[in-house]
Amino acid sequence: MRVKGQAYRSICLAADGIGIEVIDQTQLPFHFQVVRLESLEEAVGAICRMLVRGAPLIGATAAYGMCLGLRQSSCTQALEEMARRLMGCRPTAVNLRWAVERMLGCLRPLPEEQRLAAAYGEAGRICEEDVAANEAIGRWGLALIEERWREKPSGEPVHILTHCNAGWLATVDWGTALAPVYAAAAAGIPVHVWVDETRPRNQGARLTAWELAAAGIPHHLLVDNAGGHLMQHGLIDLCIVGADRVTAGGDVCNKIGTYLKALAARDNRVPFYVALPGSTVDWTVDEGLTEIPIEERGMEEVLGIQGEDESGSIRTVAIAPLGTPAVNPAFDVTPARLVSGLITERGICRASREGLLGLYPEQGG
Ligand code: MRU
């Protein structure tokens, strides 16, 4: 996608073919900074401190993190240790495990001296496949948006609500939930996006609003609690969100607050779709509520809020009495029964085992 006319991906191999360049998302929307990662330590830090975030991007960063680690040592013990460290960074997004396991599957059988070059090749393929998958999600989702548009009085935009950031910043490019929005805009279908702020880290306010502004897509930011009210007043035609893990049974784990939007959508007969690449499906898990580890983050994210002060520095201010206890689960699970459909790179299916297996038959049996 473009930032001030220049094409960017959220992650790419540096021109010297060694370092990895990522956008520091903790600085957005206030500062646009590209950061170079040079070591496994730095890749682990970038994922843990959320310079990079979003399930597919975490996976891509972990894949390149293994390349950086292999520059130090390519013996099997070092390889396994790197994989363990990367997989421990964030527990919920299954793309992290998927990418690390894919890298291990490629590298383990190779002699040590061939591993480094093979790792860069495989990490590059993971990134290219993510871009292609998201483009395809965009095409499938476009059909859905177009369908809604044809039902509306002529000239009216399709109003789409999204939660968190599942745009290009959360993937290598295009995004998942926002890919259909970008595709619709490119096809000349008028779209307007309702952006949930997504407390506590405000990925909607900080990242989605920034992405949409950069792409010239009309949007409004709303507090997390406003979505149900807008649905009751017929102001939302469609919800599209991303996912950190979708179970083989179709349950959807995504940013905290997604479940409440799905409940409101069901009560108001607003279609609720989830956009994801195949790498987000966890075929080892059927039931989401009890089987997906939910990341618990620090209380400070709830007790404070970050913004930019007049001098251009990013600062945190307290929003609750000192000493207030808080909880901070980062994700929740939306049961499959509340999901209208899953938009994948292979098509749109029902949120169920049968639906998913219809698109991914190789996972059956
Ligand atoms: O904590 P984050 O910012 O990594 O959470 C991101 C989300 O919940 C996204 O919706 C999800 O990863 C899908 S990204 C295409």
Image (spheres, rainbow, N blue to C red):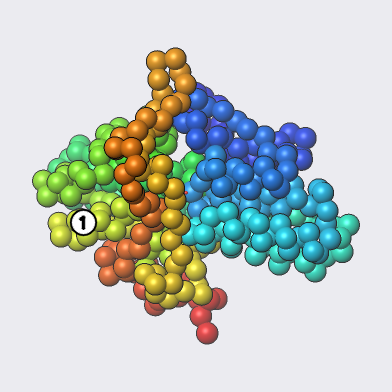
Residue at the farthest front position? 323
Q: Is residue 133 visible?
A: no
Q: Amino acid at mark 1?
A: Ala
Residue 169, how many percent across, how many down? 49, 41
337 left or right, relative to 99 = left
In this view, 196 is above or below 343: above
338 left or right, relative to 55 = left
Residue 187, how many percent across, how many down? 37, 40
Residue 234, how many percent across, how many down? 13, 47
Tell me which residue sits at (44%, 43%) in the image. 167
241 left or right, relative to 52 = left
Q: How many marks?
A: 1
Residue 153, how many percent across, how many down? 14, 43
Tell me which residue sits at (56%, 28%) in the image. 33
Q: Quadrant of residue 159?
A: top left
- Pointer 1 local density, CA inside 10 Å: few below 14, some 14–19, many at least 20: many
Q: Is residue 154 visible?
A: yes
In this view, the residue in front, 212 or 361, is 212
Q: Quadrant of residue 194?
A: top left
In this view, the residue in front, 45 or 233, is 45
Tell me which residue sits at (43%, 27%) in the image. 315
Residue at the farthest top position? 311
The residue under label 1 is: 265
